[in-house]
C-alpha cells in the first residue's frame, strides 16, 4: 500500500503548523521569559519529535499501514486542539528568571521543566504523525520527508505573516487552525471523524479571527522597576514585541551629571517622554517634541551627545534611533541633516504613526531621513560619507527571528563593522559609541575599545591609539552602572580637539579616561596604552577580545569558569551575560534529563527486557551525527547571512526557507540515489560544507553592495545545492533501515531528535569559543563520519537497497 496524496498533504500541513509554532514560540518566550529562552523552542520541537519515536518503538503494531492511517488522523485532530490548550496552560505557570548565589533556584528549574513538558505535547503529536508515516511506508521515505520539509519551509513564511498580522497569541491560534486543516486532510474518508475535523477547523479559525479583533488571550506584562507599568500601546512583528508605557513627566538622560539634572528640573527646560520596551526588556524613550529645537537643548547635557561639541554642522547618521532622542540631540546641536537607520519597522511606526503628534512628526521632517534596514549593511552599501556616525547603547536583548539561542550577538560591534564605519567617515568624521561602564571591572568598554582599535587597524591605521578618546561618567553613589562614550576619529585627534574635549567634559561633569597626550586613567586607559595588548587581553578575568563577524557575541563577556562569580551580578551588563550562560546550561540540563528519562532510558529498557530489536552502534552514529550536523550548518548559516540580508526577518524567511525547501527536494530525489551510499555522495557533501566555511564570507562580502532582491537571489543560489544534499542522508538511511532493520526505525528517529537538540546548543558553544566557521568545519566532519559509518554497514549487507523510483 502506497501513501496517498491526501496523506502527504496532511504531513505537509502538519509540518507547516509545527515550524510556525516553533518560530512563534521564540518570540513569545523572549517576551515572557527573556530572550535567552529562544533556544527552548528548538529544543521542544526536536525533543517532542524524538519522544514520538519512543512511543512507536513500544507499540510497533501501530505502524501497520491500515492502523497507521487512523492513528495519524487522530493525532492530527489532537494537535489542533492541544496547541491552544497547552499555550493557555503555559501562561499560568509562574516562572520568573531569578538568580541566587548557587545559580537558578530549584523551584524555577521545576517550573521550567513543567513548561518544557507542557509545550512539548504539540511537537510530540506532530512528531508522531511523521514517524508513523515513515514507519508505515519506509520505502517512500523520500516523498514523506519531502512533504515534511516543504511544509516546514512554508511554515517559516507563515510564522512571519501570523506574527505581523495576529500578534503572539493570535499566531498560536493560527497554528491550531493549520493543524486542523491537516486533520481534515488526514481524516477524509473516515466518516464521522471528517465532520469532527471540519468543526475543529471552523472553531479555531473563528478564534483566530476573534483574537485579531480583540485580545482573547493576552501576554502578561513583566514588572519594570518593581511594578507593572501602564500599557498604552502594543504591537507584534517577526522582529519583536514593541510596547509603549505611560508618559513620564521628567527628562530622560542616559548619563548626565547630577548638577545638570537638578538644573534641568529646576528651570523646567525639558519635555516629557514615554517608555518604549522591546520584548519587555530593552528600553528606549519616545521623546516628546513640539517642533522647537531650542526646547530639546537639554539633550546636549548627556554623555552620548559629547561628539557634537567637536564638530559644527555635522552630517550625521544615527544607528538605532528608537524613539528619536538621538535624532533630536543631533538636530539641536546644529546637524543640517540626520539619517536614522532603524532595523525594527514597528519602532518606526510608533514614532511616525501612532505617536506622531507627541513626537512632533519628527520622522516626517525634511532634515530627517528614516531608513528601515540593518545599519551595518546600509552603511556598507551607501556611497555617502558622514561627519558623525552615532550608536548609543544599541542592544535589544531580544531573540533574533531565527529562533536560535541568541546571546545577543550583534553585527554592529565587530571588527568588520568598525572597518565599514571607518570607510564611511569624512576626513574630520568621528564614530561615537556609548556603552555601560562599570568602574571596578569595565570589561564592556574595554571590549568596545579593543574591537574598535582592531577595526581601525584593519582599515589601514598605523597607530589607532592616536585616533581614540574615551570619556566616562563612572557609576555614582547609589548607581551600579556608569557609562562611557568612545570616540573613534578617522584622522588622529589634534591637541586642540583634545583640549576642547577635556574642557567640555570637566564642565559637564565627565571624566576623560583616555586621550592621546593625556594621562591614562583606570583599566581602560591602561589597556589602551599597554605595550602588549594581546597579553593584557589574555590575562584579563573577562573576555575583552575583539569581536568579529565569525565570533559576533560582543556581549558575551563571561567565560565558563566565571559562571558562579556572584560579584559579576552587581553590574546589569555582566549579569545578563551570566544569565545567558547559566540559562543555556540549565536548559541543556533539563533537556538532557528529559531526553534520558523519556527517550534513551525507555529505548534501552525495551531492548533489554522485552526483547525488542535495537540498532547497531553504526546506525546510532549515523543518525545521531546527522542530527548534530544539520543544526551545526543551519544555525551558523542563519547568523552569517543576517548581516548580508540586512534584517533578521529576511534571514529567517530566505535562509531557513531555502534550506528546508531544497532539503525537501533532495529528500524527494533520494529515492533514485540509494546507490550513492557506496559512492561519492558523502565526500561531495563534506566538500560543499567545507567550501561554505572557507569561501562563504568572501562571496558575501563581494556581493554586499548588490540590491536586496539580488542578494536574496544570491542567498538562494548559495544554499540550494547545500540544502539539496543535506536533505538526502536521512531518507537514504531510513530507507535502508526499513529494508533491513524495520523494528529500529523509532530508535533512529529518537536518537536523531535528541542529538539535534544537543547540536543546536553545540553550534552556539562552538560559535562563542571558536567561531561560526568552526561550527561548519565540525559539521563537515560529522557528515563524513556518518557516511563512513553507514557505508560500512551497507557493505555488510548482502541484500540490495530498496529503491523508490
Image (cartoon, grey):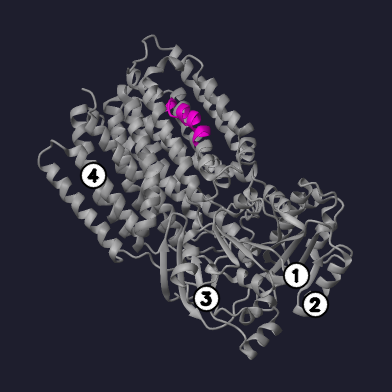
Question: Residue 48 occupies which quadrant of the picture?
Answer: top left
Counting residues from the start of the chain, the first of labels 2 and 3 encountered is 3
- The percent position of residue 506, horizontal first and vertical second, equals 80, 77
Tell me the number on the disc at residue 181.
4
Q: Residue furthest left?
A: 191
Which x, y percent locates residue 190?
13, 37
Q: Residue 470: within the magenta?
A: no
Numbered range of the magenta stretch: 716-730
Q: Are marks 4 and 1 in contact (CB under 8 Å)?
A: no
Disc 3 packing (10 Å; few <14; some 14–19; many ≥20) = some
Residue beneath disc 2: 506
Label located before the other in sequence (3 or 1): 1
Q: Is residue 279 visible?
A: no
Mark 2 vs mark 1, foreground winner is 1
Find the distance from the CA under tag 2 to the CA under tag 4: 68 Å
Q: Quadrant of residue 301?
A: bottom right
What SS does tag 4 mark? helix
**Label 2–label 1 contact, CB within 8 A:** no
The correct choice, above or below, for 246 with respect to 783 in the image is: below
Amino acid at each position: 500500500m502506497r501513501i496517498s496524496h491526501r496523506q502527504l498533504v496532511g504531513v505537509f500541513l502538519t509540518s507547516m503548523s509545527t515550524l510556525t509554532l516553533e518560530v512563534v514560540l521564540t518570540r513569545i518566550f523572549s517576551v515572557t521569559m527573556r530572550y535567552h529562552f529562544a533556544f527552548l523552542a528548538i529544543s521542544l520541537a526536536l525533543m517532542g519529535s524524538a519522544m514520538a519515536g519512543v512511543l512507536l518503538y513500544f507499540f510497533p503494531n501501530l505502524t501497520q499501514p491500515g492502523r497507521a492511517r487512523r492513528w495519524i488522523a487522530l493525532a492530527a485532530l489532537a494537535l489542533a486542539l492541544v496547541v491552544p490548550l497547552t499555550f493557555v496552560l503555559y501562561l499560568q505557570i509562574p516562572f520568573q528568571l531569578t538568580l541566587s548565589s548557587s545559580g537558578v533556584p530549584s523551584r524555577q528549574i521545576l517550573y521550567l521543566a513543567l513548561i518544557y513538558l507542557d509545550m512539548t505535547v504539540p511537537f510530540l503529536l506532530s512528531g508522531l504523525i511523521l514517524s508513523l508515516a515513515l514507519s508505515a511506508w519506509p520505502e517512500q521515505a523520500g516523498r514523506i520527508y519531502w512533504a515534511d520539509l516543504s511544509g516546514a519551509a512554508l511554515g517559516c513564511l507563515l510564522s512571519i505573516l501570523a506574527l505581523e498580522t495576529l500578534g503572539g497569541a493570535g499566531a498560536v491560534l493560527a497554528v491550531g487552525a493549520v493543524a486542523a486543516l491537516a486533520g481534515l486532510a488526514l481524516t477524509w474518508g473516515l466518516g464521522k471523524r471528517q465532520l469532527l475535523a471540519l468543526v475543529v477547523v471552523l472553531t479555531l479559525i473563528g478564534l483566530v479571527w476573534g483574537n485579531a479583533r480583540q485580545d482573547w488571550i493576552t501576554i502578561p506584562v513583566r514588572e519594570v522597576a518593581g511594578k507593572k507599568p501602564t500599557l498604552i500601546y502594543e504591537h507584534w512583528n517577526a522582529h519583536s514585541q514593541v510596547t509603549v508605557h505611560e508618559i513620564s513627566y521628567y527628562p530622560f538622560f542616559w548619563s548626565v551629571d547630577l548638577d545638570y539634572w537638578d538644573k534641568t528640573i529646576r528651570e523646567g527646560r525639558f519635555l516629557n517622554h514615554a517608555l518604549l520596551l522591546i520584548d519587555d526588556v530593552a528600553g528606549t524613550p519616545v521623546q516628546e517634541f513640539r517642533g522647537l529645537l531650542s526646547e530639546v537643548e537639554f539633550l546636549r547635557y548627556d554623555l552620548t551627545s559629547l561628539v557634537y561639541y567637536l564638530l559644527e554642522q555635522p552630517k550625521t547618521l544615527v544607528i538605532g534611533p528608537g524613539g528619536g532622542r538621538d535624532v533630536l540631540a543631533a538636530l539641536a546641536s546644529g546637524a543640517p541633516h540626520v539619517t536614522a537607520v532603524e532595523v525594527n519597522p514597528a519602532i518606526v511606526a510608533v514614532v511616525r504613526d501612532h505617536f506622531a503628534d507627541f513626537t512632533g512628526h519628527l520622522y516626517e521632517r525634511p532634515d530627517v531621513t528614516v531608513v528601515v534596514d540593518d545599519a551595518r549593511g546600509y552603511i556598507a552599501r551607501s556611497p555617502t560619507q558622514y561627519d558623525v556616525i552615532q550608536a548609543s547603547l544599541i542592544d535589544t536583548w531580544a531573540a533574533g527571528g531565527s529562533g536560535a539561542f541568541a546571546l545577543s550577538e550583534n553585527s554592529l560591534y565587530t571588527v568588520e563593522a568598525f572597518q565599514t564605519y571607518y570607510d564611511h567617515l569624512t576626513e574630520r568624521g568621528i564614530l561615537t559609541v556609548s556603552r555601560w561602564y562599570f568602574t571596578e571591572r569595565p570589561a564592556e568598554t574595554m571590549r568596545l575599545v579593543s574591537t574598535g582599535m582592531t577595526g581601525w587597524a584593519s582599515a589601514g591605521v598605523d597607530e589607532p591609539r592616536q585616533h581614540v578618546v574615551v570619556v566616562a561618567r563612572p557609576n555614582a553613589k547609589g548607581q551600579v552602572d556608569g557609562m562611557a562614550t568612545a570616540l573613534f576619529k578617522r584622522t588622529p585627534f589634534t591637541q586642540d580637539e583634545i583640549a576642547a574635549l577635556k574642557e567640555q567634559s570637566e564642565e559637564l561633569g565627565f571624566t576623560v579616561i583616555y586621550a592621546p597626550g593625556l594621562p591614562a586613567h583606570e583599566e581602560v586607559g591602561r589597556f589602551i596604552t599597554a605595550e602588549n595588548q594581546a597579553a593584557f587581553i589574555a590575562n584579563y578575568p573577562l573576555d575583552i577580545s575583539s569581536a568579529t563577524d565569525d565570533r559576533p557575541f560582543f556581549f558575551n563577556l563571561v567565560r565558563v569558569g566565571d559562571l558562579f562569580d556572584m560579584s559579576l551580578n552587581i553590574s546589569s551588563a555582566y549579569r545578563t551575560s551570566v544569565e545567558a550562560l547559566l540559562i543555556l546550561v540549565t536548559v541543556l540540563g533539563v533537556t538532557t534529563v528529559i531526553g534520558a528519562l523519556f527517550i534513551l532510558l525507555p529505548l534501552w529498557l525495551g531492548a533489554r527486557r522485552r526483547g525488542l530489536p535495537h540498532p547497531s552502534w553504526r546506525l546510532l552514529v549515523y543518525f545521531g551525527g546527522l542530527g548534530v550536523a544539520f543544526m551545526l550548518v543551519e544555525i551558523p548559516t542563519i547568523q552569517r547571512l543576517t548581516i548580508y540580508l540586512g534584517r533578521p526577518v529576511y534571514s529567517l524567511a530566505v535562509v531557513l526557507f531555502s534550506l528546508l525547501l531544497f532539503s525537501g527536494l533532495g529528500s524527494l530525489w533520494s529515492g533514485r540515489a540509494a546507490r550513492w551510499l557506496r559512492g561519492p555522495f558523502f565526500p561531495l557533501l563534506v566538500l560543499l560544507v567545507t567550501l561554505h566555511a572557507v569561501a562563504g564570507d568572501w562571496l558575501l562580502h563581494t556581493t554586499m553592495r548588490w540590491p536586496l532582491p539580488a542578494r536574496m537571489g544570491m542567498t538562494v543560489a548559495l544554499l540550494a545545492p547545500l540544502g539539496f544534499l543535506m536533505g538526502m542522508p536521512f531518507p537514504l538511511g531510513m530507507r535502508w533501515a526499513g529494508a533491513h532493520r524495520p523494528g529500529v526505525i523509532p530508535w533512529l528517529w529518537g536518537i536523531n531528535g535528541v542529538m539535534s537538540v544537543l547540536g543546536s546548543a553545540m553550534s552556539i558553544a562552538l560559535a562563542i569559543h571558536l567561531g561560526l566557521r568552526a561550527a561548519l568545519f565540525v559539521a563537515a566532519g560529522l557528515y563524513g563520519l556518518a557516511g563512513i559509518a553507514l557505508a560500512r554497514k551497507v557493505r555488510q549487507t548482502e541484500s540490495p537497497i530498496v529503491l523508490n523510483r
